[in-house]
Amino acid sequence: MTELQRAIYALALSPEIQLGLFRDFVCKGEELVLDFEAAYAEGLSLSLASASQRLAFDELDKYLESHSGTQFQELYMDDSQLFDNVFWRRVRVLANQCISSMGWEYQAPPKSAAIYVRG
């Protein structure tokens, strides 16, 4: 499983499962998006993707980007937002569209391997 697949699968999960992918002390929404952004920026997994496949990923990326900045901070810093906010429901739909466009068979992603330094 590539990092991009892992990030997309994680974004597509139910909030209950998303919470379990990360350490208790981190903001899960923020980590979900950071993982996607890092993997998407690499772009290696999409180098041979079709135009429609790239479009699905671009749509997700643009949606996340349109909800960035301090005015949207609560979406990422408050884990309860994963459950009730329409933003996260839309993210899950877009992530599932990415999975479908690539013809990937859904797999549960492993927990994050990120190393966190508490300051």
Image (cartoon, helix red, strand yellow):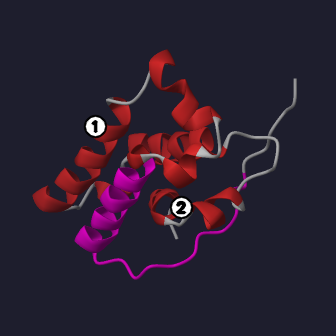
Is residue 107 shown in magenta? yes
Position of 37 relative to 50 (above/below): above
Whole-percent x, y for residue 91 in the image? 38, 52
**Which residue is found at the position 81% from the left and 49% from the top?**
24
Question: Mark 2: which amino acid?
Answer: Ala
Q: Nearer the viewer, residue 114 or 62?
A: 62
Q: Quadrant of the C terminus?
A: top right
Quadrant of the rendered image containing residue 104? bottom left
Q: Would residue 52 appear left or right of 103 to someone viewing this image? A: left
Pick out the residue farthest to the left.
51
Whole-percent x, y for residue 103 in the image? 28, 78
Q: Nearer the viewer, residue 6 or 77?
A: 77
Question: Mark 1: which amino acid?
Answer: Lys
Position of 78 relative to 88 (above/below): above
Pick out the residue farthest to the top.
70
**Which residue is found at the position 54% from the left and 66% from the top?**
14
**Which residue is found at the position 24% from the left and 45% from the top?**
58
Q: Which residues are magenta?
A: 88-113
Pick out the residue farthest to the front.
84
Dot 2 crowding, Cα within 10 Å, few <14, some 14–19, many 20+: many
Whole-percent x, y for residue 45 in the image? 37, 59
Q: CA separation, marks 1 and 2? A: 18 Å
Q: Earlier in the sequence, mark 1 or mark 2?
A: 2
Whole-percent x, y for residue 93 in the image? 33, 61
Is residue 91 shown in magenta? yes
- Tell me the number on the disc at residue 62: 1
- Any part of residue 52 in sight: yes
Dot 1: what SS? helix
- Tell me the number on the disc at residue 102: none
Dot 2: what SS? helix
**Which residue is found at the position 28% from the left and 37% from the top?**
62
- Tell me the number on the disc at residue 10: 2
